[in-house]
Image (cartoon, rainbow, N blue to C red):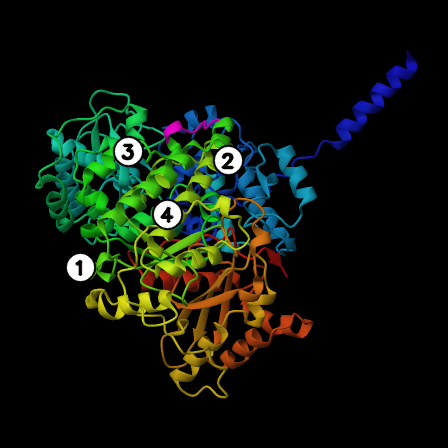
């Protein structure tokens, strides 16, 4: 008995000894000035905290881009969970709860709460900031999106975390705050971490006068009660629910379109649904415009113009034309609402397609930057660089003959029709791929039957206005991506042609119907379906190529993939183009740009990266005296297989922002975009087996590309010859590494924040409407 007592006592002592001790509260110097959240605190948070804590990929779901997000606090629940078997309750800020108390019931906990005595503060936020001030050096590797042990809720958990990770205070893996910044935050926290007062908050969320007038006009249009306006508004809402709407009044504010139980002029009573086409759950609802008062971050900043010109355009597209059926309301039966070819079949396909074409870059952008901030599900299905063009409405048979769409509507269903709990067994049935295959085969046969002589340049949409985007470049940056007007980079391996059925399904499968809180099965089903959509876009492009070369080109794009896994349905028709060269892909795009695309759109090939027919990448120049010499340097190191990009194959180095300091001119900024060569992108797993690094290539793009820089590079103009030579001759030796390290800004550099601030400010100056804060979660992980 005595032995048992001793053992129990020892065990108890052992457990107690292992329990981590909470850090000592941080002493606060008493001050008699009040710290203002909007004027004093928010500017610091925006510059140093929001750069990692925003969107779905915020560590611990701590969103610091607004006071509401900071007050909500953190959660231990992961939004990105590749093993989730049950749908997670959504936790969208400003949507799924209306108060901090409601968030507490959803297992969010405070990071600003203080329980220490007067003169001290033990909030999690200040403890982490203070620890960094005492341990300023960043050491080792930092993966903000995967290092989840920082989601501490108690002082004991925090103590254990800091004991195990002494160099992981906040900011995570970057230099600490300046002393004055730290003292401001500390004093604010000690004063109760108060947000805007009611007067400030009201001003903060209330539209300015010009915007209020625009809201009145738009809400009147969107809530016009007749069926034609109501179904038009529904179509617009389902396509614009992610948009940051710009009324172009000069206010510099943006708005979002929401559904509300309350009408215009009343406070918005938000209707929270997982998807924009879900049943609102009330008989009467209204479309409302709500001001966005969170700090704008670039990765979710998808701007859509909503001025009077746009209103007139919507009237032209949707209200003035005669519809295919007498306009009528459609209910929210999931089997119908998830399929836009059924729910909107009364609206002329030409109107729907032209809306998408008018806003092509925005619509593609929602797939690239929409509901998935961390885009591995949608993005390992595409190549690192490709060009996109669109079928002209006059040549799109689904537009010319709407009966074909109606006939095929069941085959045009997307996996989101099953909701977020897509059954595991359903994945193996491949129901939606089979349906898509049936549509692809029918479409190709239908196309061939109506185009006996094939498709020519006239079948590609040329744009109707200078601001249109008939040609787009998509870049994948491993787990993020970006889309750009025009043709950037060199000639890509693949190109897509998108028609109306493909465009609408890309949007509904990957944007409107995608649930980031859904199960593994839902996410995998979406990924597998995107394979079908990608192949469809590639197949439509191949219809323009010589018939004898189509299969050869496709086989090259799918190197290593067995034919049974390639669901390609060739159109039995020739090309309508009489090609003159042995490079039909190059000839096609060069002729299209030179002779067919509207000149005022300004499409031209990338002088730094594109190598035309009969040309080759030059050697580095012997000296740098003129702009032509520098351009030659860029063209030389954009060659596939250039030494540095062939050797540095880390997927965490794909995007670098470069500043060149010029003595008498404005500093020059460009982005290094690293494109990894894939033999194919046909499978969601084992991507590393498809790489062929001998063909990796960098593009050098003027300005800013992407939202997640992996590195900053800071050069003086006199450094360029050495920098270019270092890239061209890199062999991985210690000397070569040190040579490049002179220019690449490491996350541990003492002046890191000053360098970041310069890039962020320059982005704002260059793109005042479309800029937002960059995200530093994916900055190169190693601190040195």
Residue 363 placed where, x, y %?
A: 30, 47
**196 or 670, nearer to the observer:** 670
Looking at marks 3 and 2 on the same chain, the residue that comes earlier in the sequence is marked by 2
Q: Is residue 6 above or below residue 499?
A: above
Disc 4 versus disc 2: nearer the observer: 4
- The residue depicted at 28 percent of the width and 35 percent of the height is 408
- The span from disc 1 to disc 3 (Cα, nearest Å) is 32 Å
- The span from disc 4 to disc 2 (Cα, nearest Å) is 42 Å
Looking at marks 1 and 4 on the same chain, the residue that comes earlier in the sequence is marked by 1
Which residue carries the number 1 mark? 465
Q: Are dots 4 and 2 in contact, CB under 8 Å?
A: no
Looking at marks 3 and 4 on the same chain, the residue that comes earlier in the sequence is marked by 3
Which residue carries the number 2 mark? 74
Which residue carries the number 4 mark? 536
- The span from disc 3 to disc 2 (Cα, nearest Å) is 44 Å
Extent of the magenta region: 417-423
């Amino acid at each position: 008995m005595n032995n048992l007592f001793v053992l129990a006592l020892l065990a108890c002592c052992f457990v107690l000894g292992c329990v981590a001790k909470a850090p000592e509260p941080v002493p606060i110097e008493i001050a008699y000035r009040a710290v203002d959240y909007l004027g004093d605190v928010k500017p610091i948070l925006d510059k140093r905290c929001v750069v990692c804590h925003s969107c779905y990929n915020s560590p611990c779901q701590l969103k610091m881009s607004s006071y509401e997000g900071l007050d909500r606090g953190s959660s231990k629940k992961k939004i990105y969970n590749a093993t989730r078997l049950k749908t997670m309750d959504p936790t969208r800020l400003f949507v799924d709860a209306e108060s901090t108390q409601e968030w507490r019931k959803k297992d969010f906990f405070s990071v600003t709460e203080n329980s220490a005595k007067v003169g001290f503060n033990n909030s999690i936020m200040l403890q982490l900031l203070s620890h960094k001030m005492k341990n300023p050096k960043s050491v080792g590797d930092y993966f903000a999106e995967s290092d989840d042990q920082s989601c501490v809720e108690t002082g004991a958990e925090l103590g254990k975390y800091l004991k195990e990770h002494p160099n992981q205070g906040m900011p995570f893996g970057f230099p600490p705050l300046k002393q004055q910044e730290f003292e401001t935050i500390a004093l604010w926290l000690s004063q109760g971490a108060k947000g805007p007062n009611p007067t400030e908050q009201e001003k903060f969320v209330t539209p300015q006068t010009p915007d209020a007038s625009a809201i009145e006009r738009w809400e009147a249009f969107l809530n016009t009660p007749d069926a034609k306006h109501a179904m038009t508004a529904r179509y617009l809402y389902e396509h614009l629910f992610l948009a940051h709407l710009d009324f172009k009044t000069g206010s510099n504010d943006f708005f979002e379109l929401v559904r509300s139980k309350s009408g215009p002029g009343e406070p918005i009573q938000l209707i929270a649904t997982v998807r924009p086409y879900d049943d609102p759950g009330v008989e009467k609802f209204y479309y409302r415009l709500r001001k966005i008062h969170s700090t704008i971050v670039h990765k979710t900043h998808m701007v859509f113009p909503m001025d009077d010109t746009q209103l007139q355009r919507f009237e032209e597209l949707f209200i003035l034309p005669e519809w295919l059926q007498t306009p009528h309301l459609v209910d929210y039966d999931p089997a119908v609402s998830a399929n836009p070819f059924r729910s909107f079949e009364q609206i002329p396909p030409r109107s729907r397609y032209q809306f998408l074409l008018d806003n092509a870059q925005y619509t593609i952008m929602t797939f690239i930057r929409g509901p998935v901030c961390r885009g591995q599900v949608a993005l390992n299905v595409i190549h690192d660089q490709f060009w996109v063009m669109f079928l002209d409405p006059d040549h799109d048979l689904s537009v010319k003959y709407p009966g074909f769409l109606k006939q095929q509507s069941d085959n045009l269903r997307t996996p989101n029709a099953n909701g977020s709990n897509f059954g595991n067994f359903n994945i193996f049935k491949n129901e939606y791929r089979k349906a898509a295959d049936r549509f692809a085969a029918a479409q190709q046969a239908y196309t061939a039957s109506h185009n006996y002589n094939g498709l020519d340049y006239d079948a590609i949409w040329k744009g109707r206005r200078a601001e249109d985007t008939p040609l787009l470049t998509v870049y994948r940056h491993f787990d993020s991506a970006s889309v750009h007007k025009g043709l950037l980079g060199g000639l890509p391996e693949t190109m897509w042609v998108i028609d109306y059925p493909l465009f609408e399904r890309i949007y509904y499968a990957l944007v409107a119907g995608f649930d980031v809180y859904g199960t593994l099965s839902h996410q995998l089903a979406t990924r597998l379906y995107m394979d079908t959509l990608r192949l469809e876009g590639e197949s439509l492009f191949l219809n323009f190529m010589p018939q004898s070369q189509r299969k050869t080109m496709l086989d090259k794009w799918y190197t290593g993939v067995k034919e049974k896994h390639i669901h390609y349905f060739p159109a039995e028709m020739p090309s309508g183009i009489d090609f003159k060269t042995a490079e039909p892909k190059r000839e096609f795009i060069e002729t299209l740009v030179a002779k067919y695309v509207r000149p005022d759109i300004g499409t031209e090939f990338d002088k730094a990266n594109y190598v035309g027919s009969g040309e080759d990448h030059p050697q580095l120049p012997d000296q740098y005296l003129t702009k032509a010499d520098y351009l030659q340097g860029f063209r030389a190191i954009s060659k596939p297989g250039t030494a540095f990009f062939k050797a540095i194959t880390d997927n965490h180095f794909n995007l670098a922002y470069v500043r060149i300091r010029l003595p008498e001119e404005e500093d020059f900024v460009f982005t290094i975009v690293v494109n990894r060569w894939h033999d194919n992108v046909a499978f969601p797993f084992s991507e590393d087996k498809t790489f062929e690094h001998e063909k990796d290539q960098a593009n050098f793009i003027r300005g800013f590309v992407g939202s997640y820089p992996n590195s900053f590079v800071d050069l003086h103009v006199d450094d360029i010859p050495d920098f270019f030579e270092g890239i061209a001759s890199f062999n991985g030796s210690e000397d070569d590494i040190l040579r490049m390290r002179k220019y690449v800004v490491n996350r541990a550099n003492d002046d890191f924040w000053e360098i970041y601030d310069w890039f962020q400010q320059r982005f704002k100056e260059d793109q005042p409407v479309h800029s937002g804060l960059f995200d530093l979660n994916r900055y190169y992980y190693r601190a040195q």
